[in-house]
Amino acid sequence: MTAPESTSPRHPLALANVIAPPATVDGFVAEFLLNLAQDRGVSLQDSTVDDRYLALVRTVRGHLAARRLETERAPRHGKTICYLSAEYLLGRQLDNALLATGLADVAAQALAACGVDFDELRAHEIEPGLGNGGLGRLAACFVDSMATLGVPSIGYGIRYEYGIFRQSFENGQQVEHPDAWMRGGSPWEFPRPERARTIRFGDPDAGWAVRAVPHDFIVPGYLSGAGILRLWSAEALDPLDLPAFNAGDYERAVRARTFAENISKVLYPDDSTPQGRQLRLQQQYFFAAASVGDVVDDLIASGGALDELPERAIFQLNDTHPVIAVPELMRLLVDEHGMTWDAAWAITQRCFAYTCHTLLPEALEIWPVDLLRDLLPRHLDIIYRINEEFLVAVRERFGEERVAAMSIIAESPVRAVRMAHLATIAGAKVNGVAELHSQLLRDTVLPDFAEFSPEKFTNVTNGVTPRRFLRLANPALSALITEAIGDGWVTDLERLRALEPFAEDAAFRSAFAQVKAGNKRRLNDVLRVRDRTEIDETHLLDVMVKRLHEYKRQLLRVLHVVDTYEGVVSGRVAASALQPRTVLFGAKAAPGYVMAKRIIHLINAVADVVNADERLEGRLRVLFPANYDVTLAENVIPAADLSEQISQAGKEASGTGNMKLALNGALTIGTDDGANVEIRERVGDENFFLFGMTEPEVAALAPVYRPGGSVDAGAHRALDLIASGAFSGGDRAVFEPIVTNLLTEDRYMVLADYRAYADAQARVDTAYADQDAWTRAAVLNVARSGYFSSDRAIRDYLERVWA
């Protein structure tokens, strides 16, 4: 029997708009129980926590899907922003989805009516570890803001089977474990196997290929709209070699599957080996090619012409990881669609924009020519031609003298492709992520390019979403703010300025202080269960939470802890003279970053000794909860009193943790680096503890700096105590590499800034002793942090980059 021919829909429901599930308690109960029965195959009485959690997700997802379909039906204005990022650090999705849909109260009442513990289901959610730190969290904030602002957008990335590793400590040392975030499935996603793409590596005639299968996550806008995050997973074209399997060679039978799946297996595989570097490049090309091809195919399917692409879409390159998308678009246009080189290049130069997130030369990716020739020979040919034509223009403008510096191809120490150069040449715009960073990008990182094409360079200071990092993370403060100035701040964070007069209101300050105390109690509850530790809620909570890297100078913080400790145990300082303080670290070190892992070991060793020494009378404690993630951040940040932003000036591009902490009422101790500069300018010098050299002073000192020549007495005492084995059971060798590195190299000038840092910490102690004045300063930090919203950042991108 043949199926009837397709006809136009006639049923009223088929002609109507998408019907969302009812947003009532009874409607939510009905949907929840239906999902338990149909999706999980169980009744409420027989369900497990996992069943109930997954049914709840399906219920909420139904509301998101209806909103997403309505968004797709609405007329679109302007180009689609295609955000290419190797990582998205999303955090837990349930509370964010409930907030965005306005269903939080409905869901709570519905589950209570069913006798279901809502908090148990929220705690059951596993956070997807699809990012490493600020870069991935920024990408998550940006897709949130684009959805909230109604910007046509799609985020593209990789659906890593194992995200950033889970961290534990054994004998104080970091141990990495697989982050199996999908072990219970991935209930928020919509697999799209019909949109799978073939991605080819190696020689076009003799290479190999994998399938890129998209999985869509709905990104809910706050109370309206929805975007898409499309993550690609890698699969083998032929997952099973049946003849090999039948012959008993089971390893060979699944070899193609193993090879393919490795590409989307782990976020940032260790690239200290040739195999690791090859896998990283495979990952980057895999998701960049899949994403570019996806957009081009959509354009063609909609009846658009290829020369319309710049008006229909722009690819935002989030750092250098996706820059291989540039030659991939050229390959598609020239090789597969028959365009001339000049026509294809004219289109390509209008389709890309590049965000640089670093000032560190080693973080600007450079791929060896030999590796590209093996994996992507056609792309290397395209890069060579782009470079040749660009260098003709360079010679016309500057002569021969700048050719080597501006070439995409570096000739030493090995012949390699400079991805930042390629992105800058191809990009319509290049932006830094804080005012200082953008200036240094133009002046020191890409100065020749800034002179060659000054119109390309601009700044967009980063921002964070107020929905997750204030409204969700700090509900008590959010309620206090809303009571004072209304709820419009959730989508217009600059409205926080209206809080300024409340800094002079004694009753408001008292309520604000009570909120901070309540947040410390909440953090304590989390730490007791999660880490079997706790904070003293009467202490100043001093927080340094960020990726472990030497330039971020966690060493500076721990040296001051050791100096303080030494003062008490030596008898120079009475314990009673100390301002009670808990120093909380949160950080992961890249698995191959040996010095960073040594610093983690040192922090934990210092914590063990300091926390056990009764001579301190409990007035100084050091905590390092393992596996710092977004979920823990949402508890730490609202409780923090002091935000440590102490990178060497000129090294941090922006930072976003500094913004989150200030927005939640923590005062900053920091250098004039990254977005610290703009935070200090807005909150006021009197509400910020500034210390250390400026970037010009660092640059002037660097050529003549001899760290061992003149060490501050406090730093010297700290180094001597570490070197003595006091924190390593008497074994002097354990931390000798750290001490020697500081005294002989000190690349990030920890010792040069130490005295200024210690003096700034003394000012912190004095200021915190006056609790009412401290609270006033904290209120002003919140009131003046509205600029640091990702909504504002996206508006800046629309005006300065994507126009």
Image: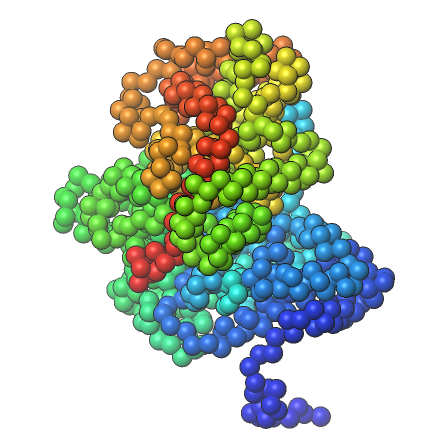
Residue 71 position, x and y percent, is: 50, 72
Residue at image position (60%, 23%) is 621
Residue 72 position, x and y percent, is: 49, 74
Give the total of numbered labels: 0
Residue at image position (54%, 36%) is 640
In the rendered image, the vertical position of residue 337 relative to residue 414, given as above or below: below
Q: Residue furthest front?
A: 506
In the rendered image, the vertical position of residue 512 relative to residue 10, given as above or below: above
> Where's the N terminus, which quadrant?
bottom right
Residue 528 position, x and y percent, is: 70, 35
Q: Residue furthest right?
A: 46
Which of the colour schemes (rainbow, by chain, secondary structure, one colour) is used? rainbow
Q: Quarter of the image holding residue 364?
A: top left
Residue 250 in sight: no
Residue 15 position, x and y percent, is: 56, 87
In the rendered image, the vertical position of residue 764 relative to residue 630, given as above or below: above
Residue situated in front as seen by the camera: 96 or 208: 96
Residue situated in front as seen by the camera: 383 or 689: 689
Classify residue 229 as left or right of residue 328.
right
Residue 575 in sight: yes
Residue situated in front as seen by the camera: 292 or 720: 720
> Where's the C terminus, which quadrant?
bottom left
Residue at image position (62%, 18%) is 610
Classify residue 41 as left or right of residue 318.
right
Q: Quarter of the image holding residue 782?
A: top left
In the rendered image, the vertical position of residue 192 relative to residue 443, given as above or below: below
Classify residue 346 as left or right of residue 28.
left
Residue at image position (63%, 49%) is 127
